[in-house]
Amino acid sequence: MRLVIKVGTSLIAPRGRIDTTRLRALVDQFDLSRDEYLIVSSGAIASGMSHLQLAEKPSNVPLMQACAAVGQSALMHTYEQVFFGKKVVAQLLLSSDNDELSALLARAVQADWLLLLTDVDGFYVPNGKRPRLLRTVSKLTPEMEALCSGHGALGRGGMRSKLRAAKMASEAGVHVAIVNGSHERAIAAALERKIGTYFPPKRTAK
């Protein structure tokens, strides 16, 4: 099975610093002897901010690029650490919103699954005083997108970005789930459809 795993900034660098322990716990869930994994990782800008001692996310492109340049080497060093003895690590730098990029990648490699890992349990909709988690979204509507606003303090994306990525990938025949990546069995539980919000494929990709 081929899986594309998108790891968001809020998960990998929740306070502007790469959380090695959390990343290692995630990688330990990979069944490397059976499945293929492609990781679309955020976190370079947040990591660079901490190294450059910036308290707030830059608003101009040159400074954001500087943060990404500084943080990218630290991010890859962390991945090399957590994969040490398991797999050789390589990187491919591409531009785009990472949610959209993960969907494009999943479509290009004909992935079986796209897992969008974040720090929330999935896609919530209003339900009186307590929002309700949607477990399955068979059709994404403009009204659903309108429920989303804003983005993370350190990341570029938000729930709207993830919904659009899920729509793009599912329409290409990929199973998609938006999942809380801090769950101790996030990957297995997502594949078993026990957690998160699931988007069934619209057609067969292969």
Image: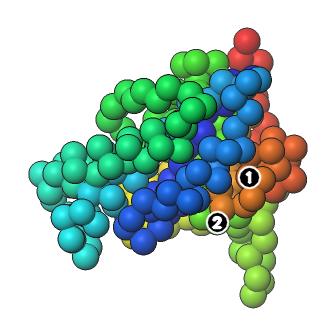
Residue receiving disc 2: 120
Could one spot residue 125 in this view of the protein?
A: yes
User: In the figure, 187 relative to 169: above or below?
Assistant: below
Quadrant in the picture for residue 145: bottom right
What's the residue type where badge 1 is placed?
Ala
**Which corner quadrant holds the N terminus?**
top right
Q: Earlier in the sequence, mark 2 or mark 1?
A: 2
Q: Does residue 130 appear to the left or right of 140 in the view shown?
A: right
Image quarter of residue 180: bottom right
Instruction: Return the mark for residue 186.
Output: 1
Q: Residue furthest left?
A: 62
Q: Residue at x 68, y 45 (%)?
A: 28
Q: Residue 14: image x %, image y %?
A: 47, 67
Percent of width and height locating residue 172: 65, 24
Disc 2 crowd, CA 10 A, few/some/many (<14, 14-19, 20+): some
Q: Which quadrant: the C terminus? A: top right
